[in-house]
Amino acid sequence: MTASQALNSRISGMEAITDSAPPPVRAWRRDARGRYAGTGLPTRRDEAWRWTDLSPLYEHLTRPAPVAQTLKNAPDGPFSAIDCWRLSFVNGELQEASADLPAGVRAMSLRTALLQDPALAAQMGSNGASAFLSLNSALAEDGAFIHVAAGTKLTKPVHLVFSNSSDAQIRNLVVLEPRADLMLLESHFGPAETDYFVNQVSDVQLAEGARLAHYRDQAEGLAALHFHYLNARLEGDAHYDGFTLTRGAHLSRNESHMAITGRHAQCRLNGVNILGGDQVCDTTSVMAHQAPASTSTQMFRNVLAGKSQGIFQGLIRVAKPAQRTDARQQIKALLLSTQAVQKSKPELEILADDVKCAHGASAGQLDAGALFYLRARGIGEAQARALLIGAFLEECVAQIEGGSAQEAEHIQQAMQAVIGAWLARQLAVENV
Amino acid sequence: MGKAMLEIKNLHVSAEGQEILRGVDLVVNAGEVHAIMGPNGSGKSTLSYVLAGRPGYDITQGSIFYRGEDLTPLPPEARAAKGIFLGFQYPVEIPGVATMTFLKHALNAQRKWRGEEELDAMGVMKLVQREAGKLKISADMLKRPVNTGFSGGEKKRCEILQMAVLQPLLAVLDETDSGLDVDALRLVGDGVSALRTPDRAMIVITHYQRLLDHIVPDFVHVLSQGKITRSGGRELALELDREGYAGEQPPERIPARA
């Protein structure tokens, strides 16, 4: 059976299951199936996938999906010690949710939410050309639904914990009404040896003046395939602060489609990707400025050891009405080995005439002069390398805003600790 | 080996296939300050890098013994822990690493290497602040990333601060006076002089004699085309200052290749 035959049979299997869904949801899924049938999975002949070899996914799909395993407790991550309202998912199914949510906040299973209010489907994007988006819309059974009422500010974050060991199509919908304020944390992890396939789509709707701090730790098992598609819309004065740490999965893609539809909205899309072995991480973004006087910044830092590959494709699109847009994009990669590869493609598509746009991409090795300077002061080579790499990433981690300075410091330190542990392991491996 | 702290014999060093040092001999004892002067390109900085163990320099002949031990196989961090300090001509900017953090790592790495107890953050801070005060280095500067955005004078003062905190036995100061105005020169010169002790030796590399008004040397050597061509006392520096390096050509000129 080929990969596409295998997927088609999974899709027809889903048709039976989802027959019980409310009619608007069924219609929505049917449309997605139709769109998927029109495109199929992408190949490297598709411009958007030119640099990312999907053959591990094709091979995976020719085999039966891995049997779900019972995982022990979640491993420590940057968010473990943070006091949160937690929702725990196993292969995309909600298992446990904090019950003591404050008034004005709903955090629950998306499947349940759609049964209660089928009209929610209208808030979920499915029009994009991405096959992974269509596939997810056709197949996803569950995920998180989070709704924060107008003017509600949460006193602590909501944490989505995704434990995966088998194939999962996960769908999240996050809706912040005007001036709502939320910090949303996500952790993704799974067993090291299993080549499970996770395809997650998150739809994020930020109404006027809403504020979302959205931080993710992708620590999937090192044989996993992880695809993440973020579909966000920012209305006037909305503020999105995103940061993703990618350290897991054999092959991953973080694809973000940010539509800035309101004036003075601010969008920050940042990330640190730390990869070793033969890991591949693709960061793809479309930052679409559609309204005047909005700002966006994108800062990505990759540290690539072994034979790992970092891929970055970032398009800034400024529509004609989006005058006085300020859009910045920067990707820097540090190659720790001669076999590591970074490919970067910044793109600008500007139709307005009064805009500030800046982009930069660089890839290089550790500075030999700086390394010697530290060693000449007595700092051993491995520690000196770790210090310099940590400093390279610190600039990006320091962008995490949090809801308050204290919260920001807390999350930044937790991220740095995880990065530091990774570095210590990686440098120990390199020295063997 | 006797009591010599540093004994360099017939040292030949090449970098990128080019011979830079062509037979340097030098003996430095504890408590002594040696000035090495010479024109640009004579090999002064190479000598300092070779002593500190910078990768990329090949010792093709000769030896370096430090306190009776062959220095050449040791990595830079081991040399530092054994008490060798290089004051850089061009201190390197390290964005993202705060100066205080850097000093803490350096001090504790050396202490750990020597089997001494590491100092806690408070202990390091007290020690650093005490020395920083003498060099007019503000608490704000210690919070800034190492050398990043520092003026030339600030960078050199920070080098001396590192020396004061790390307390080396042999300090090699490479053109510590370059880029300093008169006031900064006095501050740095006085800072270094304050670190002169009977058990510490210094090699002060400089192009001009003016630094030697502040750090008065016991011996002055002229390094020219990879060799020490003259040695003398303080008066040699004054003579070179009057007459320049024009006469300092080695006896055998290298014939130009056709």
Image (cartoon, coloured by chain):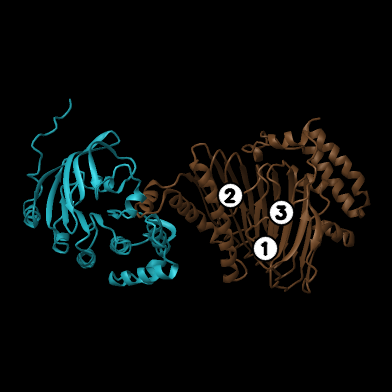
Chain colours: A brown, B cyan
SS at mark 2 in the image: strand
Q: Position of residue B57 (x, y in %)?
A: 30, 40
Please tell me which residue is depicted at 7% across the width and 53% down the height of the picture. Answer: B236
**Percent coordinates x, y for residue A247 in the rendering:** 61, 49
Q: Residue furthest top?
A: B258
Q: Nearer the viewer, residue B251 or A287?
A: B251
**Structural crowding at the residue carrying mark 1, measured as other residues with C-alpha within 10 Å and reported as few (<14), some (14–19) or many (≥20):** many
Cα separation, mark 1 vs mark 3, equals: 16 Å
**Disc number at residue A91?**
none
Which mark is nearer the camera, 1 or 2?
Answer: 2
Q: Which residue is mark 3?
A: A231
Q: Nearer the viewer, mark 2 or mark 3?
A: 2
Going by the numbered disc 1, the residue's amino acid type is Gly
The residue wearing badge 2 is A273
Is any atom of residue A369 visible in this view?
yes
Name the residue tied to disc 1.
A262
- Looking at the rendered structure, whether the residues under marks 1 and 3 are on a common chain is answered as yes
The answer to whether marks 2 and 3 mark residues whose Cβ atoms lie closer than 8 Å is no
Q: Tag 2: residue type? A: Asn
Q: Amino acid at mark 3?
A: Asn
Q: Is residue A65 left or right of residue B88?
A: right
| Chain to which the residue tagged by mark 3 belongs | A
Q: Are marks 1 and 2 on the same chain?
A: yes
